[in-house]
Image: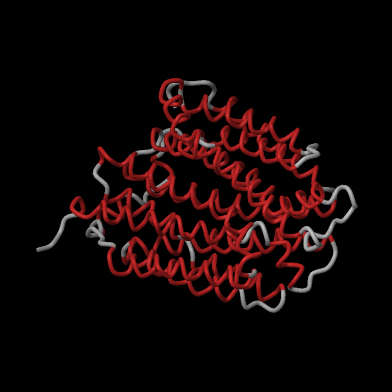
Amino acid sequence: MELHGHDYWQRNLAICLFGSFSTVFAMTLILPFLPIYVEQLGVRGHKAVVQWAGIAYGANFLAAGLIAPLWGYLGDRFGRKPMLVRASFGMALTMPLMGLSTNIWQFVGLRLLAGIAGGYSSGATILIAVQTPRDRLAWALGLLASGVMAGNLLGPLAGGALPSLIGIRATFWAAGGLIFIAFVATAFFVREAPLRSEATRNSGEKGWSQLPNKGVVVIMLATGLLLMVANMSIEPIITVYVATLVNNADGVTSVSGPNSAHVTAVAGFVMAAAALGSIVSASQLGKIADRVGHSTVIIMALTTAGLLLIPQAFVTKEWELVLLRFLMGLALGGLLPCITAVIRHNVPDNLVGTVMGYSLSAQFAGQVAGPLIGGFIGGQIGIRAVFLGTCFVLLVGAVWNWKTIGFSRRD
């Protein structure tokens, strides 16, 4: 007896939740020891390590952003489940290979390949959005987003601890094993509802001309890009910044010096602090946005996060950076849900998927640009300039939203 979509959406949600968590966990796992691994692959010098760490981290998102439209097209043609199977298998294969790299070019190439193969969480979001009953959709997507944020939280924590226990290369292999479990679960237990008819699918491709509020949609796409630039510009240089704080007394600047285990552990806490803040605040900011307007929360969140970046540039203790990153996570926690809500309120039903695809592409662009910008500025000007420059980006975004939408209850 053939099941209907509503009969198996909860099982799909559970599997996609685990798959999204495991892939994000694996990708953020490498952040605390990324500069150390870059040094182990033969890169020498503070400036070169910072820049190559940014290139290596951003390579994944560059490839993902370029290939995403193709995977979206193939998903429309052949189904969402095959895209999830492809993404989980591809990442389960490339992650262990990263641990076998012998030089920086191999590592960057594998990061590019992982980006081409990946995209599990975005594909899972589309699958769940299509199959979940309308009266449970917000809850299901919120739970899926929580899995992604949990991966962002726990990945850096594990990445700060595992290398000292099993070694850096074995950490890559363990991450690949976790994703392989997600691949098996997806391949054998995810069920997909029938695709829409060709006529219905084509009705949503007429495009941009159908949007009644193009300006609002454009500013939301730009805000998603700016948010990712702000987040990702900081991530690749945090380990180096923490090293300067930990080693301040003796002037050591190498991230792989005698304090490397402590440096990676602290860096993991710093990175996890922002994700924890977002998990804590996301649902509460959503409730506030429903009352006062999503654009109001977006403007206030961008402003608050921007101002919090200023003291981050001048901290002298590790715990100060952890606290400030947590507060910044609190401020930014509800931004992506609010951006999505504004888009949905300003886009016809038959174009929501298409425009959300544009939104994902904009966020991928920010994930590419952020590490490259942060690595370049950190290497050429200084790490403090990365924090101050990111502050400027967020404040520009706040002013732009205020000028375009304003503090409105109707977004």
Q: Position of residue 170 (x, y in %)?
A: 59, 72
Is 203 on the left-hand or right-hand side of 245?
left
- The residue depicted at 64 percent of the width and 69 percent of the height is 168
Q: Give the tally of numbered discs.
A: 0
Where is 234 relative to 26, above or below? above
Where is 198 relative to 230, above or below? below
Q: Nearer the viewer, residue 11 or 256?
A: 256
Q: Residue furthest left?
A: 1
Q: Nearer the viewer, residue 65 or 93?
A: 93
Residue 58: which quarter of the image?
A: bottom right
Is 329 on the left-hand or right-hand side of 35?
left
- The residue depicted at 77 percent of the width and 49 percent of the height is 241
Q: Position of residue 53 (x, y in %)?
A: 71, 61
Q: Residue furthest right?
A: 250
Quarter of the rendering occupied by the C terminus: top left
Q: How is the image coloured?
A: secondary structure
- The residue depicted at 49 percent of the width and 69 percent of the height is 91
Quarter of the rendering occupied by the N terminus: bottom left
Is 207 on the left-hand or right-hand side of 265?
left
Q: Nearer the viewer, residue 260 or 27?
A: 260
Q: Nearer the viewer, residue 368 or 304?
A: 304
Q: Position of residue 374 (x, y in %)?
A: 73, 50
- The residue depicted at 60 percent of the width and 25 percent of the height is 403
Residue 406: which quarter of the image?
A: top right
Q: Position of residue 43 (x, y in %)?
A: 79, 69
